[in-house]
Image (cartoon, rainbow, N blue to C red):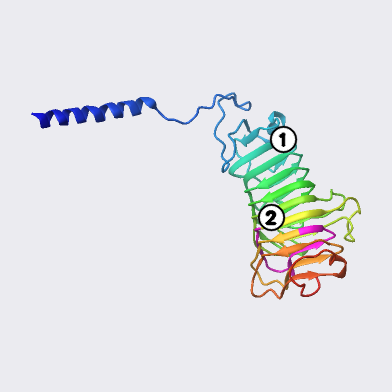
Amino acid sequence: MRITWRLVLGFLAVSVLALLAALAGPSWPRDGGADRGSGTAAAPSPGRGAAPCTVRAGTPREAARLARPGDTVCFDGDLSRRRLVITTGGSREHPVTYAGDEDAVAGITIEADDVIVEGFRSVRPAAPGIELTGHRVTVRNNTVIGPRGGDGDGIRFFGDDLTIARNTVRDTDNGHGRHADCMQTFASGTPASRRVRIEDNRCENVDNMCLMAEGPDDGEGDGRGTTADFTIRGNYCETLRASQALMFEDVRNATITGNVFAAATDHAIGLACHSAGARVGGNTLHPGIRYEVGIDASSRADYQGPEPGGPP
């Protein structure tokens, strides 16, 4: 009889614990905020680790009207046949984030300060696949495949305090006289660029260079401003037809570390036209690369890195 009561008491204890767990319900917090774009509760953000969406918009024009500093804007509907044009930013402390979840767009143009653009995918967009002009702009976790037309570039950038991180650019094409770089900046009728971080990107199957950076006094620029203070770190670079993977002309104080140069270019890095103050180290080179750094006499001031092996 004592054994029977023990079994009964054990069964009752397990039943009570199960009932309490069911009544407790899920433990995650509830979002009581409103979504200005739809009038409903804000949905979770599609971005990897991004903040929840605070605005939902059907079109880029609607996003420009609704976005406020600190917002995360997500898009409803199909944007695959239109270019995502961003003209509304936030503030230094509270940028506006435009977030996708591998959303397809026909390229991206950013003409605003204090914005973050992440998580979009462009297949065969009009080149450049992403073009950004502004200050304190971050472009991250985007994909550009096969940009076409123009000069065939994947990403172009102009401005100060820019971050280009964890993007993938693939299949740029030098056909029809193009110079199809993974990334490019110049200063000819466009702002010079300062304090630029290019980190952990992948440039795959790129016909021309992974980065072409030209300052205002490179011989083709407009002579206004200074292009300087670039950090190029942790990128994967597969350039197929150019003599070098990275080229700097009139760019001061470039730090180039921890990158993988995965194709057999003549040399990995070119420094020319007073690109002084470069720091190079810790890069991994394809065995077919003849030398890591090519440099001209005007760029040797304050250079730190491996002994240059020839001209840029």
> In this picture, is 269 found above or below 225?
below
Rendered residue at 55%/26% (across/down):
41
SS majority, magenta? strand
Range of residues picked out in magenta? 234-254
**From this viewpoint, is residue 212 visible?**
yes
Q: Is residue 36 left or right of residue 31?
A: right
> In this picture, is 189 found above or below 79?
below
Badge 2: residue crowd in 10 Å (few <14, some 14–19, many ≥20):
many
Q: Which of the two labelled residues, at mark 2 and mark 1, occupies the earlier sequence position?
A: 1
Q: Is residue 84 left or right of residue 249?
A: left
Which is nearer the eye, 8 or 116? Answer: 8
Q: Quadrant of residue 257?
A: bottom right
User: What is the C-alpha distance between the residues marked 2 and 1?
Assistant: 33 Å
Which is nearer the eye, 51 or 298? Answer: 298
- Indicate whether residue 240 is drawn in magenta: yes
Mark nearest the camera among 2 and 1 is 1
Rendered residue at 75%/42% (across/down):
136
Q: Residue 75's x, y, as percent? A: 62, 36
Q: Quadrant of residue 18?
A: top left
Task: Give the amino acid type for the residue marked by disc 1 in the picture.
Answer: Glu
Task: Give the amino acid type for the residue marked by disc 2 in the picture.
Answer: Pro
Rendered residue at 11%/32% (across/down):
3
Which is nearer the eye, 239 or 267? Answer: 267
Q: To which residue does mark 1 refer? A: 93
- Indicate whether residue 274 is drawn in magenta: no
Which is nearer the eye, 3 or 183? Answer: 3
Q: Is residue 15 left or right of residue 88?
A: left
The secondary element bearing badge 2 is classed as: loop
Q: For the view shown, which residue lies furthest in the front direction?
A: 2
The label number, if any, that marks residue 147 in the structure image? 2
